[in-house]
Image (cartoon, grey):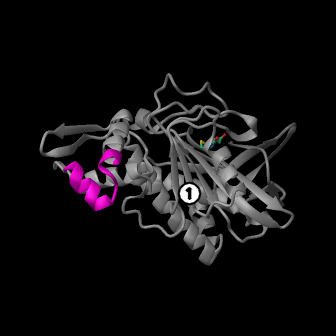
Amino acid sequence: MTSRDRILNFFRQHPGQFVSGQDISDQLNISRAAVWKQVKSLREIGFHIESKHSAGYRLVDTPDLLLAADLKQNLDIRLIGRSILTFKEIDSTNTRARQLGHDGAEEGTVVIADRQLSGRGRMGRSWVSPAGVNLYCSILLRPQIPVQQAPQLTFLSAVSVAETLHEFCGLSAGVKWPNDVLVNGFKIAGLLNEMDAETELIRFVVLGMGINLNISAEQLPERQLYPATSVALLTGQPVDRLGFARALLQRLDGYYQEFLEQGFAPIRKRWEALCGILNQRVRVEQGTMTLEGTVVGLDSDGALRVQSEDGNIQRILTGDIRPL
Ligand code: BTN
């Protein structure tokens, strides 16, 4: 943890109280000059810290920033979130997490940015990522599973995002194969999972999640496959991004632990429960090919099982699904 984060934690442990520079210095074993420098730096990023002669410093107000120290506080996690890196601005959290993966960073490392300059979406699309409103998060995992099973983790992240939207924001979010999270047909989150593997061996997987929390209608991208929305647009209330991010990390960690211990079955069950199209008739569009049938579930490699009129089960691995 950086000195700045440690000082911030110290303030948070003394809510509403003045703490002297000398006390901070003694307790954290940081020089007085460094304390002064870090208080200055906290003020620069938007913390309102009052100072009073002979009393010391007092934290008065906190900006809406996602900081590693706050994200980590009292998280009850085993793997995901052991190491959290936060950035005010970055090209793409997925790109950074991949670099970290190549550099040997530990499993469960989380990269979060306030703004992405080149946020990436699926199929080479970009992901609109303005500052101060949403959650842009990537998680580095090193599961020891066969390459073909890597898509299972996409369903793990989709379920975690949809359930956190329900638990934390009261929204009934559903999942849409393969990896969209929608509320009433409006896209609220996108997932971009990337893998680095050598033949049969997974080196790492990056789970990338972009969740529209407080983005306004004007900031939303032009309509793509689905119209987009955000939590604030749906509920009329801004969401506490920090609380949301913490709840999401907690859930992801729990489900990843369960996945490592019990395999894909529990996640598949949850995904099927959240998938609005189970037992429904759909049209699958794969380039110029289309197919109609009833969705009957998910295979262990992430393929969607669609039963056509003649009773045959088709395994769908790519394409767009539209309910009929
Ligand atoms: C989609 O096209 O639906 C997927 C969008 C994924 C966006 C997230 S934001 C955090 C992470 N970093 C990126 O560059 N992309 C993903």
Q: Is residue 138 left or right of residue 322?
A: left
Does the magenta-highlighted stretch encompass residue 24? yes
Name above or below for residue 286 compared with residue 295: above
Residue at numbered disc 1:
159
Is most of the magenta stretch helix, strand or loop?
helix
Quadrant of res 273: bottom right
Quadrant of res 267: bottom right
Does the magenta-highlighted stretch encompass residue 317? no
Q: Nearer the viewer, residue 70 or 242?
A: 70
Q: Measured from the top left, where is residue 154 in percent x and y?
A: 66, 56
Q: Is residue 140 left or right of residue 172?
A: right
Inspect the image, locate mark 1, and give the three-letter code of the amino acid beneath it. Val
Q: Is residue 247 visible?
A: yes
- Quadrant for the N terminus in the image: bottom left
Instruction: Check the image and name the residue furthest to the bottom.
Output: 261
Q: Measured from the top left, where is residue 35 in percent x and y?
A: 32, 47
Q: Quadrant of ligand 1?
A: top right
Query: In this figure, what is the number of numbered marks?
Result: 1
Q: Measured from the top left, where is residue 304 in percent x and y?
A: 74, 56
Quadrant of res 123: top right
Q: Nearer the viewer, residue 274 or 136?
A: 136
Please name the residue shown 63% across and 40% down the image: 92
Please name the residue shown 56% across and 39% down the image: 185
Which stretch is magenta?
Answer: 20-34
Instruction: Check the image and name the residue furthest to the top.
Output: 218
Q: Nearer the viewer, residue 74 or 194?
A: 74
- Which element carries disc 1, helix, strand or loop? helix
